[in-house]
Image (cartoon, grey):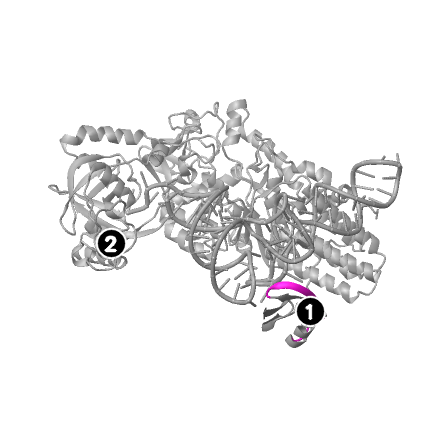
Amino acid sequence: MSTKYNYKEIEKKWRAIWEKDPVNPTNTDKPKYYCLDMFPYPSGNGLHVGHWRGYVLSDVVSRYKLLQGYEILHPMGWDAFGLPAENYAIKTGTHPSVSTENSIRNIKRQVNEIAAIYDWDREVNTTDPAYYKWTQWIFVQMFKNGLAYEKEMPLNWCPNCKCVLANEEATNGVCDRCGSQVTKKNLRQWMLKITHYAERLLNDLQKLDWPEKVKKMQSDWIGKSYGAEIDFPVDGTDKAIKVYTTRPDTLYGATFMVLAPEHELIKDITTPEYKEQMDKYIYEASTKSNVSRMTDKEKTGVFTGAYGINPLNGAKTPIWVSDYVLADYGTGAIMCVPAHDDRDFEFAKKFDLPIIQVISKDGKESEELTEAYTEPGIMINSGEFNGMKSEDAKAKVPDYMEEKGFGKKTVNYKLRDWVFSRQRYWGEPIPLIHCEKCGIVPVPEEELPVILPNVESYKPTDTGESPLAAIDEWVNTTCPCCGGPAKRETNTMPQWAGSSWYFLRYCDNHNDKELASKEALKKWAPVDMYVGGIEHAVLHLLYARFYTKFLYDIGVVDFDEPFTRLFNQGMITKDGAKMSKNKGNVVSPDEMVENYGCDSLRMYELFIGPPELDSEWDDNGIDGVYRYLNKVWKFVDEYKDKIIEPTKEIEQAKHKMIYEITTRLEALTLNTVISGFMEFTNKLVAAAKNAGGIDKDSLETLAILLCPFAPHIAEEIWQVLGHDESVFKQTWPKYDKEKLKEDTINVAVQINGKVKANIDVSADADKDTVLAAAKEALGSKLSGTIVKEIYVPGRICNIVVRP
RNA sequence: GCGGACAUGGCGGAAUUGGCAGACGCGCCAGACUUAGAAUCUGGUUCUUUGGAGUGGGGGUUCAAGUCCCCCUGUCCGCACCA
């Protein structure tokens, strides 16, 4: 063993050994642990140190579990369909499959630099026909189960990507991918009935060991609300308008109604007098972008000339049309109570509509309302409900309505069905066939996959048609049902399709009969620990839960939540910003590995800060862990031949180290694990110095504790200590609680809460003994009358005096 | 607008959950080694008028508050006319 820590040599050596003989044994009868990284999109830009963070974290957890006696599934793959490869194809003419393959080769090389215990035999690639066969198969099952349907409706359209977007991809009216402002376009598209699962997606969140933040984002996105549907007959017609409200208690205060511009009854009820104005308004609303419809808070609207009858009190309420009412939420129509709703109040003020107060704080009517009163209170101007608490009326009014038959209690969700088709090339073809005679027929399962054909031009069109539509010989096919001429569906699936079930495929990735065998799923699934960024809180994570529940319902899997535990790692920033090629603030892991070694970079990725928070990259920071590993190396080198019986001090330092590292690792406070290594190694070194040697077990313990974090140096040390077998064959060390106890403890002595002295007392000293020692130590500092004496064993002693 | 998280030295951050604030590291300063530098090692490093003060600001509870409660300020994040 040379005295210098030669990371290059050591890492090269062990990488080769592990390649031949992986440290993670397979096909054991040990309990399983499935630790998964969110698989990356193989970008041509490669990895930066920020990407390493989550991968190191999951690898540390995997290796730790391995030493605890689990068989580990820790796979990696590629979420390779998507726009960048396609845009690159448009620019250069390179087929996306070629550029994707190149990107994967490069990124795989970089991923290998992390030295994670990935089992590459389990690699998956969403663009591999053997993989997307099953992505298509799942879609066919959804179609057969009535969860996939076609619908024409105004959809989010990204003019830059020339593609429709799901609601989840268009939050804030902006394209999730490119940041362009999204417009509305009326298109016929394939939808998945995720709303069918709204209640289960909401309720089952409580089963999950996920960050509360993510659970809240999902539950807010699903957006369940409790309310009532009420029918307002349209005066002088046989029609009625159904409204949804969460405030049935305010029904007596409804002074007008508003319909969304898309509401189907508008044309039937608008009087000739207002028709021209109405047509103009509806046209304008339909062309308004999502963004302006959201941000133009100034209320606009047109009167229909018609009146609805309040079923509770028979009041005539004018019916208006305004784009502040959304067509696809509730019933697309609302009753308006300006006295108790901010938006209705604003609308009433602008169009001079009556305001009737029906709830007040003290049961008395206010002189004049200057703003809507939205708090609970006492019912007024509400007939038989007067004097009741509004919170009680919320339940009583719907009961009354149900009795009289003009309304009912109901719930609503903000969640919309998933717009599932995309008008782009580089995605899974939707496996459906349009036949004039038989309608829409799924491609028979034995004919899957429907292979994505080559095209001349990858360019998306403005018409909402996919580039696949231009390939006649592919589009024209025969109907599997009647054998007659038919046409293929030319839309492709969104990128989320492949990632919604890939965690299942890892369990049995070579299976060509099923997406994964029952046995393999039983052995591995669901995922025990899922590590990735927060950006998928409502996208990928919601879709994957939906897919899993569906597959559970049709008997493919026997669990209904895919990810038992979720961990979101924070970003690594440079100059306060997310690393990107454009900003030129990218730190390359390749360079760090070259200059400091993989082990140092792994350690620094964890040391940089609390793993769940964003952390700023410090160019000098890695020096600290590099020096630490050098110190460990020198320590072992110096003492490996000075083996003695351990002293009490050495024993204590060792057990304290095991205790601290284990506890912190369990809590995933990995930054403090690394600082703990530094702190407790120093203690061990000092104890060894005092004793003039150290026992072998202490050195071995250090190697084992270190191996999930810095696997190469740990293996090397383990070997230097005379072992032929890998350190990863060892079991995680245990600490002895008795050995942690100190004989004497240091207690701070306070007067009135201020530290005035420090004393060493025997660990089992009682209060009186400690107080006596404390008073002695204080001496003349203690004056006045003692009012109270407090002793917290092992911590502090506080004497309260009055002068 | 609504909801959530956070605020600690020059910097990243720690604090056994109410018990000695600043662990560990970076940076900086001094010293050792060296012809010199780099590297390495050792020591120091919250401020300070040496009495104290101090965890964004103000108030409160407590023997004791970074930690609990109330008010305010700032930063970040999520949702955004969802009736």
**1 or 2: tag closer to the N-terminus:** 2
Frontmost residue, A84 versus A748: A748
Q: Position of residue A504 (x, y in %)?
A: 52, 48
Q: Which quadrant of the figure has residue A190?
A: top left
Identify the disc placed on residue A780.
1
Relative side of A572 to A413, left or right: right
- Viewer-proximal residue among A751 and A211: A751
Q: What residue type is labelled 1?
A: Ser
Rendering coords of residue A76 (x, y %):
59, 44
Q: Residues in magenta?
A: A752-766
State the residue in front, A453 or B9. Answer: B9
Left or right for A214, reference A308:
right
Mark drawn on residue A476: none
Q: Which amino acid does label 2 sit on?
A: Ser
Spatial CA span between label 1 and label 2 = 66 Å
- Quick check: A244 above or below A421? below
**What residue sits right under mark 2 in the picture?**
A360
Q: Is residue A651 above or below residue A499?
A: below
**Quadrant that contains the C terminus of chain A:** bottom right
Q: Is the magenta stretch mostly helix, strand or loop?
A: strand
Which residue occupies 21% across, 31% down?
Answer: A278
Chain label for disc 2: A
